[in-house]
Image (spheres, rainbow, N blue to C red):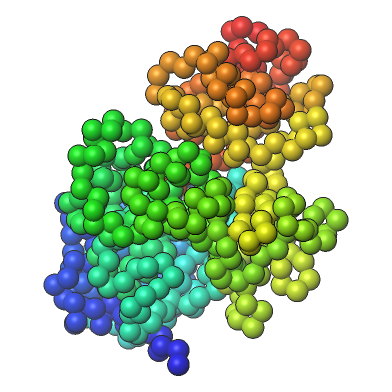
Amino acid sequence: MADKMISLGAKLAKHAQERADHPAVTCGDHSVTYAELHRRSNRLAHGLENLGVRQGDLVSIGLPNSVAFVEISYAVWKLGAVPQPVSFRLPPAELDAIVALAESRLVIGQLNDGSDRLFTTIAAVEAASDDESDLPDRTAPVAKAPTSGGSTGSPKLILSGEPGMTPATTPTTSALFISTDSVVLLPGPLYHNAPFVMMMTGTAYGAHVVLLPRFDAEATLRAIATNCVTWVLMVPTMMSRIWRLPPETRETYDRSSLQIVWHMAAPCPPWLKEAFIHWIAPAVLMELYAGTEAIATTSISGAEWLEHRGSVGRVAAGEMMIIGEDGQQLEVGKVGEIYMRSNPAAAPTYRYLGAQAKSLAGGWQSLGDLGWFDADGYLFLADRRTDMILVGGANVYPAEVEAVLEEYPGVQSCAVIGLPDEDMGARVHAIIQSSGAISQEDLIAHLSDRLVSYKRPRTFEFCEEPLRDEAGKVRRSALRDERLSPLPIPNSAQPKNCVGHPTHCAEC
């Protein structure tokens, strides 16, 4: 028999009674117990209600990682409203577009320039009420409404198909392996979907959720050791920065408490994946492939990955198939577009605002990723169709080239894009964030040993600025658009393997 479901607010009230003094959320030097989180979110909920928030309203939350982020999220849930997390770094125009699409009742952020009547702060919400009493039990019709992490054009919201509910009795085991006894570390920003979901799940299950104010490689290891962390969510960018710490720094911190380390959200270079598997144990490192839409998922353990190198695992929930350009299902080993569907008898897992799903008959939908299955049912990703580079009729998948580039010492991160080429249609261009001077000759030799000629970058660009955000996402379309000058220098004028901006190269 299925466990009874209750609202997220009711579950927090339950924890406040049964686990009153247990730590709920820690961020930096600030920590609150479940009793304190309950009282604090009650006061904020009364404040939001006095400011006009009602059941079903979307409330945009643009805050950095903090205990306050969790408190205001629960305040929103307690009103039966919907948290709509957004980056606190969004430029005003992008934030305005999201808020307009969401029809947000309020926007909660850090600064108020007086230009937006919807804008308020945590302090202002707190000042709107000093009432810490329990509210009538309400359930949000939608648990969350994040923005699309990969969108570069018009904004898109992904409204969860699940209401703001959780099991009344915390399960002893779950698909994510979070339990009441877990100490959950979230070094990534809560405005991204995966960290937000894990915060929601961790607190709903009564775990101790530890946040980093911002990601820092050594601070992550320190938090693991200091808090005896058992469960971590990372993206490959974080793993790479941790691995590039001096070995003596990495080994300074105790990691023996770790039971599960999940990584997701972006392709992980095979060399890095294997290094982490052996560093923290094959049974500890887990990978999940899915989308914010939660239509279907795959998962794979480190031990499985060593037997199926490069795979993101078998289908763990829902269904997936590979479709060719002719619309037909492809056989094993053939690269095509990944289509997914959830249980046809279940309610939809999401709803878009500002976009339409790409779909086929029978409930099958695509998120734009390419991949293939092997004979054992393990899924391998190629790339997103929109990111694929067509070089002289041959397909080049940026993630494959980026994985090889990131093996090279000194490459902190990189992004591979396609730029116009008069002869081949497109050429592969690599943008590299480096930690110091890199020998282009040695880098080319490294690539030549690992990639067929048409996949190798023909031009390189070096920078010091991060190319990926804190969730490991790279917006290749935006990087490409920035480099398409209105008056590009013809490719024939560029020396082979030129260094620098392709249209502003000192050697051209």
When the figure is inspected, residue 140 is found, relative to residue 473, above or below; the finding is below
Quadrant position of residue 296: bottom right
- The quarter of the rendered structure image containing the N terminus is bottom left
- The quarter of the rendered structure image containing the C terminus is top right
Between 391 and 468, which is closer to the camera in this rendering?
391
Between 247 and 57, which is closer to the camera in this rendering?
247
Query: Is 454 situated left or right of 242 in this image?
Result: right
Q: Position of residue 466 (x, y in %)?
A: 44, 33
Q: Is residue 293 visible?
A: no
Between 149 and 101, which is closer to the camera in this rendering?
149
Q: Position of residue 147 (x, y in %)?
A: 52, 56
Q: Residue furthest top?
A: 507
Residue at x-position 31% and y-position 40%? 217
Q: Residue furthest front?
A: 307
Between 256 and 138, which is closer to the camera in this rendering?
256
Q: Position of residue 359 (x, y in %)?
A: 74, 64
Residue at x-position 62% and y-position 77%? 343
Q: Position of residue 400 (x, y in %)?
A: 60, 38
Query: Is 425 situated left or right of 285 in this image?
Result: right
Quadrant position of residue 35: bottom left
